[in-house]
Structure formats: C-alpha cells, structure tokens
Image (cartoon, rainbow, N blue to C red):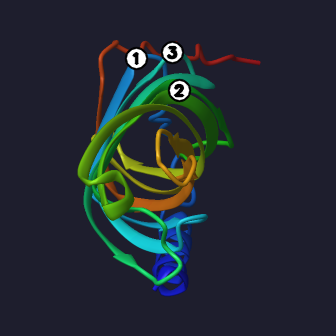
Amino acid sequence: MVKRYLSVLLFSINLLVFSQEGKDELFFNSGLLKASATISPGRMIKNAANSIYISGFLEYALDSKYSLRGDVLQFVDAHYTNAALLEPKFMNRLYFGAFRHFGNKNLKFYTGAQAGMTVIQYYHSYNQGNNFSIEPSFAIKAGITFYVWKYFHFFTDVTYVNSTTRGLMFGSQKMDELIFSAGLGFQINTKKQFRIARTPSFQ
C-alpha cells in the first residue's frame, strides 16, 4: 500500500513541476502561514503494525529558508500482527520544531526536527486492562512542497517518530514509527511583499 501511495504522489509532483515551468512569482517568503490536514498511513517499526492517523500542521515562515512548525497526529486505527507486543487503543502525537527549506523558485525540499509527546492508551493483560501514559517523543521529517498558487500548495513527506512506552511488566516498549503524509495545503502571506520596480536604462 505504501509503495503505491508514494508512486502516485511522485507522479503527481512531476506533472505539477512541468506544468509550472516558466512561472517567476515566488510564494514561499517571510510571513507565510501554512496549514493542512490529511490521512496519514504509518508503520510501527518495533511493534510490527500498520497504523492510520489524521494529521495536521501549522507552519510559519521566518524567512525564505527557515520556519517554525507544529504537527498533531490523531490516531484512528491500526492492524496488528502476532509479533505486536503492545496494541494501543489510541496513540496521539504532538510536535513542535524548526525546519530548513531548500530549492529554487516554488519547488521546496525541507527537513526538520521536532520535540513533543505521545499520549497513549493501551490494553495488555499483563498490566490488568486499559492503561494510560504520556511519554516524551521527538520527530524527524523530510519532504517536498510545490507552491502552485499564492493560496495553496501540494506536499508529501515522511516522518520518523521516536517514543517509548515505559512501566510495562515485560519492560519498556519502543513505539517508533514511520508516517507518510501527502495532500493539498493552504497558505496566506501575513506580510505584504514589496517589489522594487526596475528603472529602465537608456543607452
């Protein structure tokens, strides 16, 4: 499922890149405020499970290279295998951090690190029913954004999240996960962009 998901995204981005060739207006500037929400599939690395989240973000561009961003991941469901030691009933994640953007014009590559927390409720017979835990966590994200208009963009990214559930009778359980996101995002520029008009030269 993940391979098909990524193939469709990469194909869509290629079409967008070719359709926008020659356009000079730059949309990623200081004061740009971005937001989006989408459905994000994940893969729990240690716990051997496929998960589904509703993810959303809010991001503010400090300048043409750096931004601050907050992400929230609302757990929907997961498919567990026999190898899973812990089966969360919900596992919501919240992150905030800084990002660096690369690239020319309106095609931007980005990467960043975020600190946050994982709020998890899980069931396990060893721990006598439902248990609730809040654990520190961090995330590392990398992705691509393509700005097609001053009010919206397309994006795709992958996030590695690191968290550990402690206090279990069989020892701590790592809940590391790879989460894939893509979709349509929206933005507004909170600062007016002034353009300096070029004075024609006469020879």
Q: Residue at 48% across / 49% down in the picture?
A: 169
Q: For this rendering, which residue is in front, 174 or 149? A: 174
Residue 38, located in which quarter of the rendered image? Answer: bottom left
Looking at the picture, which amino acid does disc 2 mark?
A: Ala
| x, y percent for residue 73 | 33, 47
Disc 1 and disc 3: Cα gap in Å? 6 Å
Provide the residue designation for mark 2.
Answer: 115
Q: Give the side of residue 87 with respect to residue 84, left or right.
A: left
Rate crowding at label 1 as few (under 14), some (14 to 19) or many (20 or more) other CA atoms within 10 Å.
some
Asked whether 132 or 90 is in front, the reply is 132
* Residue at the image position 40 percent from the left and 17 percent from the top: 31
Find residue 142 and report its horizontal and vertical position in percent.
62, 48
Q: Is residue 172 left or right of residue 73?
A: right
> Residue 31 has which mark?
1
Name the residue nearer the viewer: 167 or 6: 167
Residue 56 percent across, percent down from the top left: 30, 44
- Of callouts 1 and 3, which one flags the residue occurring earlier in the amino acid sequence? 1
Q: Which residue in the protein does label 3 denote?
A: 62
Q: What is the C-alpha distance between the residues marked 3 and 2? A: 19 Å
User: Quadrant where the N terminus lies?
Assistant: bottom left
**Amino acid of disc 3:** Leu
Badge 3 or badge 2: first in the primary sequence: 3
The reply to whether residue 160 is visible in this rendering is no
Report how far apart the C-alphas of labels 2 and 1 lie in the structure: 23 Å
